[in-house]
Image (tube, coloured by chain):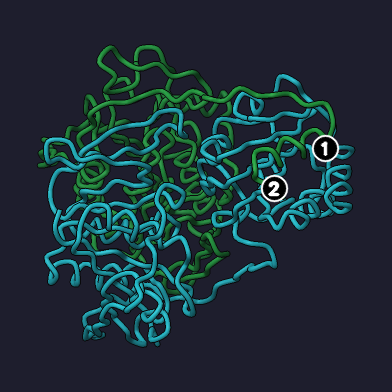
Amino acid sequence: MNKVLVLLEHDGTTLRPSSGSAIGFARELSDEVTALLLGEDLGAIAAEAAKYAPVLTADHESLSQNVADRWAHVITEVARSQNAELIVATSTTWAKDIVGRSAGLLGGAMASDVTDHEITDGQLRLRRPMFAGAVNATLILEGSPKIITVCPSAYNAPKPADIPFLIETLSVDASTLPSATRFESLDCKKGARPDVTEAHIVVSGGRAFKNAEDFEKYVGGLADQLGAATGSSRALVDAGITPNSLQVGQTGKIVAPELYLALGISGAVQHLAGMKNSRVIAAINQDPDAPIFEFADYGLVGDVYKEVPRLIEELNGS
Amino acid sequence: MKILVPCKRVPDPDQKLRLNADATDIDGSAVTYILNPFDAIAVEEALRIRETAHPEAEIIAVSIAPAEGETDLRTALAMGADRALLIEHEGQIDPWNVARILAAVIHQEKPALILMGKQAVDDDANQVGQFLAAQLGWPQATFVSKIEFTTDGLRIHRETDIGIEIIHVTLPAVVTADLRLNEPRYASLPSILKAKKKPTEHSTPAKLGIKPEPRIRLLGMELIDSQRTCEKVTTATDLLDRLRESEVIE
């Protein structure tokens, strides 16, 4: 695999930490890794990215918001002009939207949510989950370029270099960009706690919690004692108790922290898909037969309304 | 206004899966199939558009499946779609080729809106909507949780990792439904009976001028089971001790 282009996600100010996984994956495959950044006023973000790889920037006011049709158009042009054989990003809603569309412009040889890879007989074999993680599939992509998104938990960012790599600014011809999509607003719910996909510890709550106040008091309270992120099962999101940004599972976020604490979560297949690769899993549930215990290292059968305050108290006293 | 709703037939996710003899696919003989839950949300949204903003809307459900896949298209008809189109195809087909076939249907039907699930719960790829929009050169809105009609298009809420994003797209457009767009209705018995009389047209990729160009070659599958054995503890104190021993908390 020769030329690899890594698409990096940012929030307008800094790189998304999960972007490092895509660079780590690319580095395992090639020595010719280039990062691509799109946006406006990219100076500081480009300098950050240049610690990991040479950087190309498409820096233009017409790219100030990450609108799929515009961004995919630019990504496609850069991929072609650079003769990229492989295009990589970390799997997030951003990548699914924009990199997915780019793949649709570049011939559709795409694998999403890759968790592992190997090179056998010169072929790049990729592994990815299917059927809510009940199945691990091995596949080969046919055609070029190949487009791959990797699970953030599957690959680590490389160490930053002492001497930064070069940054090159590309010219952007705004007159050729699609204009059918208009960004209006982003309601960014950035709380004080770490993001669920980036935290070392995730404390997650399920159906046992009756309302948002209880969730905040018990799940939030324990998370704060541990410096953890909060997560939630789909049941609580559907009930309007937690925001959808907390949902862990097949249709939510896939996480693999050092510790996943499942509180009052029964362990539906689609939830397990989102957390079963965590290093250590502990569960508290009133039902001794709850499926979550089959996927846990440590289990406590009990009422979360009684056990969680005990945990908080003990951690507080220690 | 025509609304096209691609509908995928998927194994019911609430059942235990088995693999076929050479472990290249799931054992299809042993599973029951349903309409992909996210596509059911898309059908529901099309019905709501017809019930509110666009009473004249015609809703067409399209599926790419073997002949027996007509059963799952009937689900969309029973919910209220006007007619159905089954593109008969045996075996696996990857997102690129699904998008090519759908694009060929769209060139014939000329809908103003494609409403579809954000992903199918079998391969979990989350690609077809984006590929289709790219092939058609139409705007896309993925992970959609709310749709409003404006004078020149759609105002859309998207559920992203970092929060709710609002965008506006002109029509025609491809919109992919997320979980919280709506809660799909159950088909009533009279509507199920009525659906039997609704027209279902059959076609094939070849009749649409599409020869599959494989992009994904599946080499094999493995079923994943839990590798863990759960140690039951009896008190919160014991649980914290175990977590400290595992060096995941201080």
- Closer to viewer: mark 2 or mark 1: 2
- Give the residue displayed 71% in from the left and 42% down from the top: B244
How many numbered discs, if any?
Answer: 2
- Give the residue displayed 45% in from the left and 75% down from the top: A183
Is the residue B190 above or below the residue A310 in the image?
Answer: above
Name the residue that disc number 2 marks.
B249
Q: Pointer 2 indicates a residue of which chain? A: B
Label 2 in the same subunit as label 1: no
> From where the camera sits, is residue B60 visible?
no
Q: Judge from the rendering whether residue B232 lies leftward or rightward of residue B87; answer left or right.
A: right
Q: Colour of chain A?
A: cyan
Query: Pointer 2 and pointer 1: residues touching (CB < 8 Å)?
Result: no
Q: Residues within 10 Å of mark 2 (few under 14, many from 20)?
A: some
In the picture, the disc for residue A89 is none
Q: Judge from the rendering whether residue A37 lies leftward or rightward of residue A237; answer left or right.
A: left
Q: Amino acid at mark 2?
A: Ile
Q: Colour of chain B?
A: green
- Give the residue displayed 15% in from the left and 40% down from the top: A123
Name the residue that disc number 1 marks.
A304
Residue B16 rendering spot, x and y as whole percentages: 49, 18
Instruction: Give A125 or A133, whichever is nearer the viewer.
Output: A125
**Quarter of image, res A280:** top right
Secondary structure found at label 2: loop
Q: Pointer 1 indicates a residue of which chain? A: A
